[in-house]
Amino acid sequence: MAHGHELDAHAMHGSHALHADHGPRVLPKNLSAPPMVNAWRSQALIGGAVALLVSILFLFSHEGRMHFLRAYLLSWFLMFSLCGGGLCVLMLQYVSGGKWGLVLRRPLEAMTNTLPMLVVGFIPIMLFGKSLYLWMAYPTYEAVHTALENHALTEGEAHALTWKHMMLSPVSVSIQFCVVFAFLWTWKALLNRWSLERDADPNAGTSASFEYWRIKSENLSGIGILFYVTLLTIVAIDLIMSLDITWYSTMWGLQFLVGQGYLVLAVGIWTIVRLSREQPFATALRVTEQHDLGKFLFGFVMLNIYLTFAQFLIIWSANSPEEIGFYLHRIRGGWWAICSLDFLFHWVIPFCMLLSRDLKRNPRKMIRLTAFMMFARAFDLFWLIEPNFPESMNNFGHAGITMLAYVTVPVGIMGLWAAYYLTNLASRPLVVLNDPHTAEILEPEHGH
Amino acid sequence: MPVEEGVYGLLAEFNTPQAMVYATERTRAAGFRRMECYTPYPVEEAATALDVHRNRVPLMTLLGGIMGLTTAGLMQTWMSAISYPVNIAGRPLFSWPAFIIPAYEWTILFAGLSAAFSMLALNGLPQVYHPLFNAPNFRSGATDDKFFLCLEATDPRFDLAETRTLLEQFHAVSVVEVDL
């Protein structure tokens, strides 16, 4: 029953079967960004400039100026989410390792290098903060006391302002932001410098070099993540939560942390999938890593709704008058529609889409979905920011046309930010070479 | 029960995964579909060659998840609003925010169980008898160092003599008939 055959001939057939389709993959010689990145940058600049020009129209009315300023705060927070959040994901991929981090590393570095724009962009918030924050409008105990006597403040607001004065006063917040920016600057400068030195290492490619750089980056990143999470919580409290001085939530920092991961991954995936149309990412980005990143993004979509809903459930269960105002202001008076759309945009749509394996592996669809998720993140911030203000809470329809500042200002600022980001991206080779994972992403791909 | 008789299929034995994958690709190209590879460890290329990456497990998982969500939602609504209504701090009897966490957990539970059980069911497990174990070389080699390709007799293209000739051209160590 056994049919013996000579075995010499078929070994050749065999190796043909395993490698002909997939082939050993080689990176191209030129690892710099393809010319299309310059075209994207021009588009971002033109789009941003046009949107900012249109935004100038809003400066001619009082309502318009107010909405311009709040929309500017939203844009600044988006920039912070990408710059600081980008640093956090960069540190995360150093401590966790993995091929997903290798393909995202250069885009993340480009995000962290937009820090100068973030620092300069913070100045207007401090200059015009009187129109945003009660703690800026009434910066001292005396001012609060006088305002209370003149009935410019409610008893609750005056009490909260006095109680929170240690943290929320112009001087205190300025000091906090000096610490935040100093931290961001130190960590992003070191990680970015090491990343280039690592590739220029004369011992590159040896396991001694791999280990040296791995341990060095890990040690800085581990402690950096701890600092970042603390400082991010402070920023989220100072700039967004304190828009309503009486309200507080212990979920706040975590919610923004996850929101930043959501946005950073969306922008990162969008960038590398678009880059994969041409070399070097046509070789460097396999469907496997795109699929893995899609799953990771799905995790953030899930965690985001989990924390957002947890905060709602805690406040809903406690039903205490100090807290429920936050949600009542964001549900009543037409805000119900925005709240529902936020739920739909921010969670339902990305969740249902990312369930699909085919979608996560399809470049075109991932580009569209991640672009949509960037919009969803901005929409969520709009719902968090605008109802804080007395004329707007419980009354979505009051503002009319000037509400459009929430469209034009973020488009304008983020257009400029995107141009800066793409400039940074084009300034380095796109693929990291001195890393053990680089060999792995060049291995032939298996369907999973 | 009547005793089934006949041939289950033709089993080709190979010494290397490369040879097995090559034979699999060629026989698939020749039109065979009712076929299976048996290897001592997972060989991704074999799965690709057999095109078995697509299956119904995801659909079953989704249906399980939807079933868990509906079950938990309806169950809690019935318990809190109909079967045993209790006034809790003046909240409505149908307090959906409080139902979401259990509903979420049931979604995951049902989806997970559906994934595990549908995987077993679609694999045809549990199975107390498989004809392949009638082949002595399969018994000794399939979990050790041999790679097998089996073309099953239920395939419309299956013809004992022709299929044997087809398989023999790939220089298999052996091609054996497997009894049902």
Image (tube, rainbow, N blue to C red):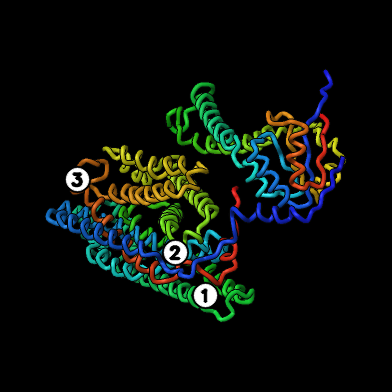
> Can you identify the residue that label 1 sits on?
A199
Q: Position of residue A49 (x, y in %)?
A: 22, 60
The span from disc 2 to disc 1 (Cα, nearest Å) is 17 Å
Direction from residue B48 to residue A84 in the image, left or right: left
Which element type, helix, strand or loop, lies under badge 1? Answer: helix
The span from disc 1 to disc 3 (Cα, nearest Å) is 54 Å
Q: Are marks 3 and 2 on the same chain?
A: yes
Q: Position of residue B150 (x, y in %)?
A: 75, 38
Regarding residue A50, the answer to whether it shows in the image is: yes
Residue nearer the viewer, A148 or A50:
A50
Residue occupying image coordinates x 44% and y 64%: A108
Disc 1 chain ID: A
> Can you identify the residue that label 2 sits on?
A108
Which of pointers 1 and 3 lies earlier in the amino acid sequence? 1
**Could you tell me which quadrant the N terminus of chain A lies in?**
top right
Q: Residues within 10 Å of mark 2 (few under 14, many from 20)?
A: many
Q: Position of residue B141 (x, y in %)?
A: 83, 46
Disc 2 chain ID: A
Regarding residue A260, the answer to whether it shows in the image is: no
> Can you identify the residue that label 3 sits on?
A399
